[in-house]
Image (tube, rainbow, N blue to C red):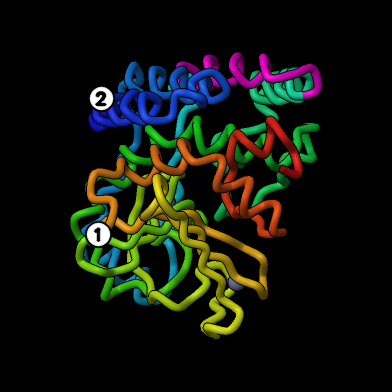
Amino acid sequence: MRETAALIAEWEDLLTRRPAFRESLGLYGTVLEAWRRWSPDGSPVLRWGAEQCRERWERGVSLIVEAPPAFQREALEPLFAPLLEELAALGEATAEAVSRFAAAWDEGRVSPSDLFPGLPTEGGEAFGISPDLLSLVTYLGLRPPLEAYFAEVRPVFSGDFWDAGSCPFCAGAPSFGDFGEDGKRWLSCALCGGRWTIGRLRCPFCDNRDAKTLTRLAAEDKEEGYLIEACDLCRGYLKGVDRRVRWNAASATIEDWGTPHLDLIASRRGYRRATPSLIRLVSPGG
Ligand SMILES: [Zn+2]
Ligand SMILES: [Zn+2]
């Protein structure tokens, strides 16, 4: 993946800033290394023109829904194998679930397209793996091929075409919410790497726009600029960074991975993430 070298540098820098996480978050280093080695050669690419994309976006339809990629199982092996190995090392129960998933994968009972969260699927229960674990496997295993798949349609996206909380490309839920230097609120998708904007006072999960039930927790002192935006109606939350305060913050994916302490704060207050995180597997229920 072309941008992986930059992500690896950002991740190293983050672990230097937050050395306490180096061991517990070691899995992400392995994942980034697998992403770096993976070659997009021969992987499908969506070749729609601007009009084709725009027509879907204006109907509120994410591209993946009408153009699901046909990823080849074998091409994904170099991404999934090291990831499953790291996950299996997290504990006995996880190791058993991972081996059930690996068996289903090897026997062809689960296909790559079964993993896309925006498309109808039987879900993880069918092969004995919890939704949290399946979702983490999906997000960490499919990012490089999805990023390659949408690479050619990214430049034709404009926020004017899209007014929804989910990703205009892969239909995934947002995983991080930044305030950019332009003052706009940017949402990021950790599944495909998509980005789009949304109104400042609006829950991307249930569309609640009532300030009275939208909660913002702003970190202070050394953590100034980091924030949690939560919704008291659907209990969803998003972590984020105000880049006008913290101009040197890393990309959304890296900042999300590197701030599990903020997930613990949100989860203790009864809020839930819509996207997977390692912390939920390591300490379920937070
Ligand atoms: Zn996406
Ligand atoms: Zn909500």
Q: Which mark is residue 193?
A: none
How far apart marks 1 and 2 lie (CA) works out to: 25 Å
Q: Does the magenta stretch include residue 87?
A: yes
Quarter assignment of residue 146: top left
Residue at the image point whose x is 25% and y is 62% from the top: 157
Q: Pinpoint residue 267: horizontal percent, then vertical percent.
A: 67, 52
Residue at the image point whose x is 24% and y is 44% from the top: 248
Could you tell me which secondary element the residue under label 2 belongs to? helix
Q: Does the magenta stretch include residue 186?
A: no
Q: Pinpoint residue 55: horizontal percent, then vertical percent.
A: 31, 72
Left-right relation of 242 to 122: left
Could you tell me which secondary element the residue under label 1 belongs to? loop
Residue at the image point whose x is 57% and y is 66% from the top: 230
Left-right relation of 198 to 123: left
**Closer-to-camera residue (10/81):** 10
**Closer-to-camera residue (197/184):** 184
Q: In the image, what residue type sits under mark 1?
A: Arg
Quarter assignment of residue 109: top right
Q: Main secondary structure of the magenta part?
A: helix
On-image quarter of the C terminus: top right
Quarter assignment of residue 276: top right
Q: In the image, what residue type sits under mark 2?
A: Ala
Which residue is tagged 1? 244
Q: Pinpoint residue 74: horizontal percent, then vertical percent.
A: 48, 19
> Dot 2, crowdedness within 10 Å: few (<14), some or many (≥20)?
some
Left-right relation of 201 to 131: left
Range of the magenta residues? 77-93
Which residue is tagged 2? 5
Residue at the image point whose x is 66% and y is 49% from the top: 121
